[in-house]
Amino acid sequence: MESCNNNDNYKFEIAYYVTQNCPNTDCCLRDSNCNTNIKELHIINLKDCYNICEIEGAYSGFRADIKLSNSDKPEATPLFIEVAVTHKCSPEKISSGVPIVEISVTNERDVLHPLIEQKTTEPLLHQHITLSNPQYIEEKIKFYNFDRIIYPCKQLSRFIIYKDSNDYIRGGIEKCIGLCNTVIGQYNKASLFEIQFDDSNLTKRYKYHIWYFGISFAIKEGINIQNCRICRNYNSCVIKLPTNKIDVRTKKRFFINVPISQLNDNQFNTTHQANNCRNFTYNAQFITQILNHFKDFKYCVSKPYLPYSKG
């Protein structure tokens, strides 16, 4: 029995064909990538799954040429690697359910081939087999009892509405911890409202940042969030800012009027300003424009807004 992790820089990879199929047909983020009949190679580094390698290892009444297992998960099913020189795997071993990689060896060069499953619709007799032809591996490497369907896992982000330390309602974006198969429906306990979305859907066809959609959607849901960027006066409002010039007579700095639309978040707090401005008014036309712009955008409400919730 030996450890599989003697050399951390070495990978022990296999590749076999799978299709993607998510069983959650009611998912609000479901798209064409969640269920496809296109077969693609799925690559696994066996060192990520197993840390024990046994020659002539036994499991469930069968003996493998090489048995890979995981000492951290002793209850998990191992993987068999079978080197078939004169005898193939028996039907009983194949039907055991244990994942098996069978390598057919007729000469010393066969063991040098990567453990990659090959697919061809061309009959074996017409393949013109040569050492440089990857179709040569078609009958040399076989995979038994591997899961041929995998769940597509997407990285999600979420737009959250929350109260800051000054009790102002704000909107922000953060990455979800985990992938879609585990995080859909989960939410930040401190938030008032949340929507989740797939980052890959944010293509160049969206003119506006997703923040605008989140803010506009929250307003539609009845949340009183105030920010200069969604105010009707945003493009005409100015603010006085100090310059580096000093008035020789008064020894005070000169001020200039600067349009707030030209300032970034580090220069101007649009949430604080809007919440303390008596002229703040929602730009209803702009908000409607934003919602229409994102009308085909896929998202799910992971935490509905409850007007009397404390978050």
Image (spheres, grey):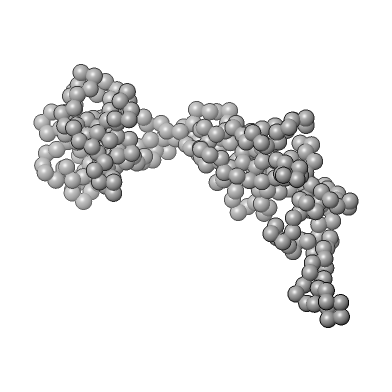
> Residue, x 81% and y 57% (percent of image)?
234
Residue 15 falls in which quadrant of the image? top left
Q: Between residues 248 and 257, which one lies in front from this camera angle?
A: 248
Whether residue 120 appears in this view of the structure is no
Above or below: residue 8 compared with residue 150: below
Q: Is residue 244 above or below residue 82?
A: below
Residue at the spot x=36%, y=39% of the render? 42
**Left or right: where 18 falls relative to 301:** left
As drawn, the residue found furthest toward the bottom would be 248
Label total for image: 0
| Rendered view: 39 above or below 58 | below
Locate residue 52, reporting x and y percent.
24, 33
Say which quadrant the N terminus sits in. Answer: top left
Quarter of the figure with residue 46: top left
The C terminus sits in image quarter: top right
Left or right: 183 in relation to 59? right
Which residue is more in the foreground, 227 or 133?
A: 227
Instruction: Return the residue found at the far right.
Output: 278
Q: Seen in the image, is 38 located left or right of residue 301?
A: left
Tell me the residue at 58%/28% (across/down). 26
Residue 147 position in % (x across, y down):
36, 29
Instruction: Please state which of residues 232 and 223 is positioned toward the viewer in this rendering.
Output: 223
Q: Position of residue 154 (x, y in %)?
A: 51, 40
Q: Position of residue 202 (x, y in %)?
A: 60, 48
Please report the residue visible at 14 percent of the width from the left and 45 percent of the height from the top. Answer: 109
The answer to whether residue 181 is visible is: yes
